[in-house]
Image (cartoon, grey):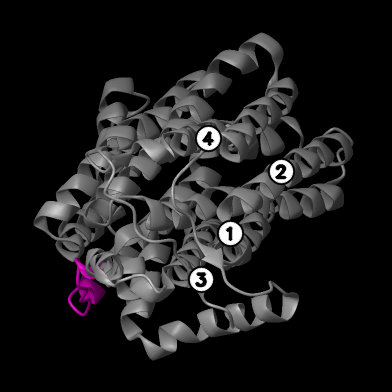
C-alpha cells in the first residue's frame, strides 16, 4: 500500500493546554455536529416506546443495529481519513447524515414504519463516526505531539459540549414548545453548520497519501489495519479498554430514559436536564484528564480513575435515585461522579497512535472501531439482559465490566514520547535536493 507522508514538520505552533489554533474551528465543528447528532439521545427511546407505541425490545434493537454500524464505520473512518484526507471524509459524512436523517424521520418515524426506521437509522449511523473520528486523525497529525493527550481532551470536551450539554439540554426546551418530531428535524441545521466549518475553516497539517489512490489500495490498508492488533498486542489491550470505556453510557441511553421517567418518577424535562449534566461535567473533565494524563501517566489515569471510577459511578448513578426517589440534588450528585469517571479514559486517544507512530491513522482506526463496538456492546448487553435479570442486575453487569479493564491495565505499556520523537527525527532529517 502507499504510505501516508507528511510535509516537513513546521515549527511548533502556540497552544493553550494542547489547543492548537490551526484546529480551533475543527473543535467548534465537532460541537455543532454532535449537537445535531445528540438531540435525540436522551429522549428517542422513551418517545418510541411511550408515544410511538413500539416495544422496549424494538427500541433496544434499533439502538443495537445503530451501534453495530457505528462500530464498522468508526473503524473505516480512520483509514479513510488517512487515505483520502479528513476534510473530504468529513464533508461526505455531513451530506450523508442529513439525507438519511431526513429519511429516518419522513419514511420511518412519521410513517410508523419500523423496517424503514432500521434501514435509515442504520445507514445514518455511518456518518457520525466518519465525521468525528476523521477529525481525531487530523488531531494526531496537527496537534502539538508532546501534548497529544491534552489535545484529545479538547476534542472530547467539544464532543461532550455538543452531544450532551446542548444535545441533551435543548430538547428539554424545544419538546414542550414544538414537540419531539420538529426537534428531531431541527438537528439537521446544527449538523450542516458543523459540516461547513470543517470543510472551509479548519487548517493544520493533515495526512496525505503518496501515489495513486485506488479501491484496491484502500482495501489493502483496511486488511493491514485489521492485522495490527495481532502483531502488536498493546493495540489489542487499548481496544478492549476503549470498548469497556462507554458500556454504561450507551447501556444507560437505552434504559434510563424509561427507568427514570416511568419507574422513578422524574418528569421528562427533569430527566433531560439531569442527563445533559453528565456531558456538562465532561466538558471540563475531558480536558482535565487529558492534561493530567500527560502529567501523571496515561495508563495510570485509565486504571485508577477510569476503570475503578466507572465501576463505582455506574452503580451510584442508578442506585442513588432508586434509594432516594426522584430527588434532583442527590441524583445530580451521582451524575457529576459519573461525568468525572467516564472522562478518565481520554488518554486512550493519545495512547493508541503512540503505539504505532508511523501508522497513527490506522491506530486511530482501531480506536474508532472500539468506540463503535462500545456503543454496540452497551446496547446489546441491555437488550440481552434487561428483560431477563431486571434493571438492577443489568446495571451490576455493566459495572462489573470495568473490573476487567482494571485488571487488564496492568499489562499495558506505552512510550508516551513516541510521537514527539518521530516528529523530532523528521525535523532533523535534511531534505532531499
- Local secondary structure at mark 2: helix
- Nearer the viewer's eye, disc 2 or disc 3? 3
Cβ–Cβ under 8 Å for marks 2 and 3 = no
Is residue 46 at least partly visible in the picture?
no
Cβ–Cβ under 8 Å for marks 1 and 2 = no
Report if residue 106 lies within the magenta region: no
Answer with mark 2 or mark 3, whichever residue precedes in sequence: 3
Identify the residue position indicated by label 2 in the image. 97
Q: Is residue 156 above or below residue 330?
A: below
Report if residue 410 lies within the magenta region: yes
Identify the residue position indicated by label 4 in the image. 29
Identify the residue position indicated by label 3 in the image. 4
Q: Is residue 135 above or below residue 107?
A: below
Q: Nearer the viewer, residue 368 or 343?
A: 368
- Local secondary structure at mark 4: helix
Q: Residues within 10 Å of mark 3 (few under 14, many from 20)?
A: some
Q: Give the x, y percent position of residue 304.
A: 15, 59
Q: For residue 76, which quarter of the picture? A: bottom right
Which region of the structure is painted magenta?
Answer: 406-418
Give the tally of numbered discs: 4
- Nearer the viewer's eye, disc 4 or disc 2? 4
With 421 as the anchor, is 167 left or right in this view?
A: right
Quadrant of image for the N terminus: bottom right
Magenta stretch: dominant secondary structure: loop
- Nearer the viewer's eye, disc 3 or disc 4? 3
Q: Give the x, y percent position of residue 361.
A: 47, 66
Q: Nearer the viewer, residue 184 or 83?
A: 83
Q: Residue furthest top?
A: 177
Identify the residue position indicated by label 1 in the image. 383
Residue appearing at x 76%, y 37% in the figure: 53
Amino acid at each position: 500500500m502507499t504510505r501516508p507522508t507528511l510535509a516537513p514538520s513546521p515549527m511548533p505552533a502556540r497552544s493553550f493546554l494542547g489547543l492548537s489554533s490551526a484546529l480551533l474551528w475543527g473543535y467548534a465543528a465537532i460541537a455543532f455536529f454532535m449537537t445535531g447528532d445528540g438531540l435525540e439521545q436522551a429522549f428517542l427511546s422513551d418517545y418510541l416506546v411511550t408515544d410511538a407505541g413500539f416495544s422496549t425490545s424494538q427500541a433496544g434493537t434499533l439502538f443495537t443495529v445503530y451501534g453495530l454500524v457505528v462500530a464498522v464505520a468508526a473503524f473505516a473512518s480512520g483509514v479513510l481519513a488517512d487515505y483520502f484526507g479528513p476534510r473530504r471524509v468529513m464533508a461526505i459524512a455531513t451530506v450523508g447524515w442529513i439525507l438519511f436523517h431526513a429519511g429516518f424521520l419522513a419514511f420511518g418515524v412519521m410513517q410508523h414504519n419500523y423496517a424503514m426506521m432500521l434501514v435509515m437509522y442504520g445507514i445514518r449511523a455511518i456518518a457520525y463516526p466518519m465525521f468525528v473520528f476523521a477529525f481525531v486523525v487530523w488531531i494526531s497529525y496537527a496537534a502539538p505531539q508532546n501534548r497529544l493527550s491534552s489535545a484529545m481532551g479538547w476534542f472530547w470536551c467539544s464532543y461532550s459540549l455538543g452531544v450532551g450539554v446542548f444535545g441533551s439540554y435543548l430538547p428539554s426546551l424545544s419538546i414542550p414548545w414544538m414537540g419531539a418530531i420538529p426537534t428531531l428535524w431541527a438537528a439537521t441545521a446544527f449538523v450542516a453548520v458543523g459540516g461547513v466549518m470543517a470543510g472551509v475553516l479548519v487548517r493544520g497539517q493533515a495526512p496525505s497519501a503518496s501515489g495513486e489512490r485506488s479501491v484496491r489500495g484502500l482495501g489493502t490498508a483496511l486488511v493491514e489495519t485489521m492485522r495490527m492488533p495481532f502483531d502488536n498486542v498493546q493495540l489489542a489491550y487499548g481496544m478492549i479498554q476503549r470498548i469497556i470505556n462507554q458500556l454504561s453510557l450507551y447501556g444507560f441511553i437505552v434504559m434510563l430514559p424509561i427507568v427514570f421517567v416511568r419507574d422513578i418518577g422524574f418528569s421528562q424535562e427533569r430527566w433531560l436536564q439531569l442527563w445533559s449534566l453528565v456531558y456538562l461535567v465532561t466538558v471540563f473533565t475531558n480536558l482535565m484528564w487529558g492534561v493530567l494524563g500527560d502529567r501523571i501517566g496515561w495508563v495510570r489515569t485509565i486504571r485508577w480513575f477510569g476503570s475503578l471510577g466507572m465501576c463505582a459511578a455506574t452503580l451510584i448513578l442508578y442506585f442513588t435515585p432508586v434509594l432516594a426517589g426522584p430527588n434532583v440534588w442527590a441524583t445530580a450528585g451521582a451524575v457529576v461522579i459519573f461525568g468525572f469517571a467516564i472522562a478518565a479514559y481520554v488518554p486512550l486517544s493519545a495512547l493508541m497512535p503512540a503505539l504505532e507512530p508511523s501508522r497513527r491513522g490506522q491506530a486511530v482506526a482501531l480506536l474508532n472501531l472500539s468506540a463503535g463496538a462500545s456503543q454496540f456492546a452497551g446496547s446489546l448487553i441491555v437488550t440481552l439482559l434487561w428483560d431477563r435479570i431486571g434493571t438492577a442486575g443489568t446495571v451490576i453487569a455493566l459495572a462489573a465490566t470495568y473490573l476487567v479493564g482494571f485488571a487488564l491495565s496492568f499489562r499495558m505499556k506505552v512510550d508516551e514520547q513516541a510521537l514527539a520523537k518521530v516528529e523530532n527525527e523528521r525535523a532533523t532529517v535534511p531534505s532531499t535536493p
